[in-house]
Amino acid sequence: MLQTSSATRAADVVPPTQAPDDQGPARPRRPWLRRAVDAAERAVPVTALTLAVAVVVTTVLELVHVQTDPWLPPLERVATWRTDQLALQVLVVWAAVVLIHAVLGRLWLTALVSGALGAVIAFADYQKMLMRGEPLYPTDVEYLGEAGLLLDSIGVAPGLVLAGLAAVVLAAVAVALVLRRRRSGQPRRAALTPRERVRALVPRATAGLLAVGVLATAGAFNEDGNPLRTLWERSGPDWARWNQVENYAENGFVSGVLYNMPGTAMERPDGYSEARLREVTEKYAAVAAEANASRDAGALADTNVLVVLSESFTDPTRLDGLEVAEDPIPFTRALMAQTPSGTMLSSDYGGGTANVEFEVLTGMSLSNFREQMHTPYQMLVPYEDDFPSLLRSVGADHAAIAIHPYQRSFYKRDEVYATFGFERAAFEDDMADAERVEDNPFVSDAGTFTRVVDELEASEDPMVVNVVTMQNHRPYDGKYDDPIDVEGALPPMDRREVGQYLRGLRHSDEAVAQLIADLEALDERTIVLFYGDHSPAIWSNQIWNRNPGQTMYETPWFVWANFETAPVEPVAELLGPNHLLNQLLSAANAPLTPYDALLAQIAEEVPAAERGIMLDPQGRQITAADLSPRARELLEDYRLVQYDLAVGEGWAEDELYKVPPAS
C-alpha cells in the first residue's frame, strides 16, 4: 500500500520543468516574451490595415490632383509613378493614419476619419487648381478661418457642406451600429484588469509616438540636415522651384506638400556681413544723393499719399481672342494716357493679393525668398516686432491708416499692418454701412473710396492711406442685372461669368472717376498710386492659348496727383510690383533713400522678376545667363539688402531708409 501510494503521488506530481507525457517536456515560463509575441500577433492586422488605408488615401490624393494636370489623364499618370517616391509618400500618410489610430483605438473609425480627411484635402486641392491654377499648400490650412469666403469663391453653399458633414456622421453611426449588432451575438469579453489595459495601450502609444516623430520630421522637411529630405533626395525628385504645378505633377502630391512646408524665409547670401552691408549702403547713398540734387526734399512733407490695390482690376481688351461689347474701363484708360502709367507683372494669377501688396509696400521681391515662402503676410511679417515698409520712405510726420473692407484676420492683415507701422486699420466690421452694388455682397469700390475721402478730410495731418478693395473678388455670377456682352474664344458657360466680371470692372472704373473728382476738390495735396493685383481665374484654356507668356499676369497701374507732377519717362514695358512705389516718388519729385536708389537701378536692368519670369526693359523674357555684369552686381546687392531687412541682423536698416543730402 505504501509503495502504491508513493507511486501514485509521484505520477500525479509534475515537476515545474516537465510537462505531462502527452505534451512533451515543458519550457521555462517567460512572461515577457509571451507578451511580446501576443502584442506582435495583435499588431499584424493593425499594421496591415493602417498601411492599406494609407495606400488608398495616397492614391486618391494622386489621382484627384492629376485630373487638373494638363499633361496626362489620371490613369495614364499611374504608369509614370516612381515606386521609390510613392513608397516615401505612403510612409508619411501612414504615419498620419497610425497617429489617428493611436488616438481613436478603432480600426474602422480610423479608416473612416482618414478617408474623410483625405477626401477633404483632395477636394480642396482640386478646387484650388481650378480656381487659381496652383496646388494646395500646407499654409492654406490658415484659410479654414475664412471658410465663408472660400466656399463662396468656389460656388459651394454652406448648407451643402453641412449636409456633407451630416452624411459623414450618419455613415459613421451606421457603421458603429452594424459592428455592435455583429458583436451582440458573440460572447462578451471579460473586462480587462488595469494592468491588462496598460499592456494593451503600450503598442498603440509606441506607434503613436513613432508617428509623431515621422510627422514632426516631415514638418521640418525644408530645414538643413532633415533626414526625411535626405531620403527624398536619394529618390531623385525633379523639383521645379518656380512651378509648383509641375512640382506636384512630377513628384507627387505628398512630395509637393512636403517641398512647400514652411522653412527658413531666405537663404543667407554669400558674403553677408556688417562691413559688406556698410559698403552697399554707401554705394547707393551716393547714387541717391546724386539723384536728389534735382529733387524737392519737401515734396511729400504736406502731401497725402494714397496707395490703392484694386482687386482683380485688369484690362481685358488687351487679351487676344476676346471681343467685348463695351469698354469696361474707359475713364481709367483715358487717365492713364495723361499720367505716369504702365503695366505691372503680377506675381500670381487668380489670387495672391497679399503677395502683390507685400511687394508694393516693401519693395521686396518674392523671387529673393525661398520658394516655400508663399505668403510673407502669413509666414514672415507677423512674427517680427516691426517690418520695413513704405512708411519708412513716405510716412514721416504722416498719419497712417490701412483700409480693407473684409475680415481683419484674412492674410493676418490686422497683425501685418500693425507690424508695418500703420496706426489704424479699418476692416469690414468698421464699414458695415458702406455701399454695395446690386447683389454684390462685398463693399463696393465707391463705398471704399468714400471712406478714404472721409479719412482725408477728417485728418489734420497729411496721411498715408493703403487701400485694398474687395468689389471684384470672386464669385461673379448673379451680381449684376446687366453683364457686358462678350464674344470670342470662350465656352458658352464662361461668357456669363466673364460678362459679370466686366460689369464689375465698369463699376470700379466709375468709382475711380468719382475718387479723382473728390480728390481734385480736396484742398490738400494728394498723390495716388493705383494698381490691379492680378487677373481673375475665369479665363478659358482657349484664351490662355491665345495669350502666351506673361500676358495673363499683366495688370494696369498709374500715378495721379491733384497737383502738377514731374515728367516721368517709362523705365520699362513691364514693371514688377516692387518697383511701383518708385514711380510715385518720381512723379512727386520726392527724394530717394539708398534703398529707393538701389531699386531704381535694378529697374533699369531687370524691371520685373516674378514667378520665375525675368524680363528685360523691353519686356522680353531673359535668364540668368543673359544678365549683364552690372545686372548681376545689382541683384547680388539686392539679395544682401533684402536678407538684412527681412530676416538678417538689420545692420543697414536705418541707413538704407535715410534720405542722404543732395550732392
Image (tube, rainbow, N blue to C red):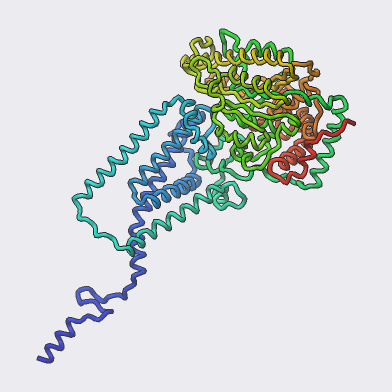
Which image quadrant is residue 546 in?
top right
What residue is drawn where x is 53% and y is 24%? 432
Q: Quadrant of the N terminus?
A: bottom left
Which residue is at the front of the view, 129 or 374? 374
Which residue is at the front of the view, 621 or 147? 147
Which residue is at the front of the view, 269 or 252? 269
Furthest residue to the bottom?
A: 2
Locate residue 646, reporting x and y percent.
69, 41
7 displayed left or right of 151: left
Q: In this view, does 330 lie above or below 657?
A: above
Which image quadrant is residue 662 in?
top right
What residue is drawn where x is 39% and y is 60%? 202
Locate residue 529, reporting x and y percent.
70, 22
Please state the total of marks drawn on the protein image.
Answer: 0
Locate residue 501, reporting x and y percent.
54, 17
What residue is drawn where x is 39% and y is 41%? 115
33 displayed left or right of 640: left
Q: Do we see residue 287 in this rendering?
A: yes
